[in-house]
Image (cartoon, rainbow, N blue to C red):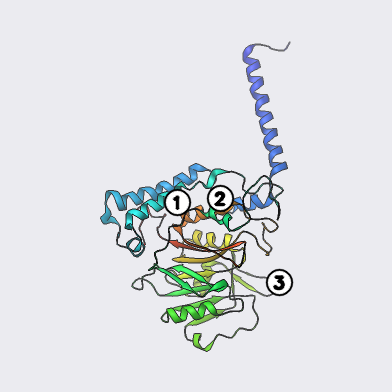
Amino acid sequence: MINTTPDFKRKDIVKWLILIFLIFSFCKVMLFSDPSIDNFKSSGIIFNNFSEKHEQYELLSAAVDICYVTGKSLCPSSTKFAKALVGGSSAFLRAVKERYNWKTFQSQDYAPHGSVLGHEADLIWPRSHERFSSLGPVVQCPKSLLKIFGTGDDEKRFCDIFSSADDVCVFLSIGLGTSWGFELEVNKRFPECTIHTLDCTVGEVSVPDVLVSRTIFHRLCLARSTFVDSNGWQFVDWRNLTTLLSLKSRPRMMKIDVEGYEWDLIPDIVDSGYLAPYSFSVELHFQTPMRLPWTGRYKSPIEIGSWMDYLFFHGGYMLTDRHDNVYCPVCSEIVITKLIDPSNQSVYFI
């Protein structure tokens, strides 16, 4: 005889509910998951949940409070960026908190299944420069620190927080293409600095005479690992690159224009924990012609915002300039600058 006591029925119902939930979860994963999203999540660029984000923020916030609330003497409040910023260190503290409060997690739809170029399933956001607004707030680099090279499509910017008393001046240029415009501008403005230019995809290269004494060309491409591909092109990861270049201190600035690879390369540099540049000048793309896991669709707002979150919480980088590229509707020229050190519980302001 079957036991029909209330206790047995309750246990039976619970078991059935658990089974139904597991079946539903399995079907959801099988029917609605997108492999490109899984690749993106597994790379660690997206925080798993709010608590992880909050935990990282607590490290930042507590240290910022130590510096600017409980004991300003513990931090150099007259540092280059804070001193140049209107409002000083108080304004900077407000900017840190504003960055945290940016609602990157308004939606959990990273890139809904079925999203392709020209059609994003269940996702409404302009396919224009406005999409880059999901990067979050800009703590604008003060005019005295914002350096601008070139004009038009060749224009590059960076926020110069470098202190010559501490480090050797080095600029990195990732992606030469067919122009030495960037290198020529840097050499003119900073003749005392060394420039390392990397590109493994170009043919014969001749460094202009005016640059020969301070510019070194390397037939290399920056990548997530070190290898030689079927074309014979040499790729090198960040740690190996710093060894090859004999870097002993953070580069003053890195210019990077790699048509979509920036989404993984920059977090890799940050995660290495080793000599990440003071400032990145990046041409950011939400569409790419390259063969990448997300080729064939657009980067979604939540991916874009989470990428900036990651660089902020894990690397202490903040968005210090945004200049949408009028020559490229899917590109924005941005500057991200290392202003704090989240690995140090007494966060210092650079």
Q: Residue 156: horizontal and vertical position, in percent? A: 51, 71
Within-10-Å neighbours for mark 2: few <14, some 14–19, many 20+: many
On residue 324, the disc is: none
Quick check: 211 above or below 53?
below
User: Circle 1 — which element?
Assistant: helix
Tell me if label 1 and label 2 are in contact, CB under 8 Å: no
Q: CA distance from mark 2 to mark 3?
A: 32 Å
Q: Is residue 58 visible?
A: yes
Within-10-Å neighbours for mark 3: few <14, some 14–19, many 20+: few
Residue behind mark 2 = 46
Within-10-Å neighbours for mark 1: few <14, some 14–19, many 20+: many
> Is the C terminus in the top left, top right, bottom left or bottom right quadrant?
bottom left
Residue behind mark 3 = 230
Q: Residue 137: horizontal and vertical position, in percent? A: 47, 54
Residue type at mark 3?
A: Ser
Which of the 4 quarters of the picture holds residue 14? top right
Q: Residue 253: horizontal and vertical position, in percent? A: 46, 70
Residue behind mark 1 = 99
Which of the 4 quarters of the picture holds residue 32? top right
Task: Decide which of 199, 91 is in the foreground and name it.
Answer: 91
Horizontal arrangement in the rendering, residue 317 relative to residue 236 (left or right): left
First in sequence: mark 2 or mark 3?
2
Residue type at mark 1?
A: Arg
> Is the N terminus in the top left, top right, bottom left or bottom right quadrant?
top right
Horizontal arrangement in the rendering, residue 282 relative to residue 297 (left or right): left
Residue type at mark 2?
A: Ile
Horizontal arrangement in the rendering, residue 71 relative to residue 227 (left or right): left
Residue at position x 67%, y 70% in the image = 229
Q: CA distance from mark 1 to mark 3?
A: 43 Å
Residue at position x 68%, y 59% in the image = 295
Query: Closer to the observer: label 1 or label 2?
Result: 1
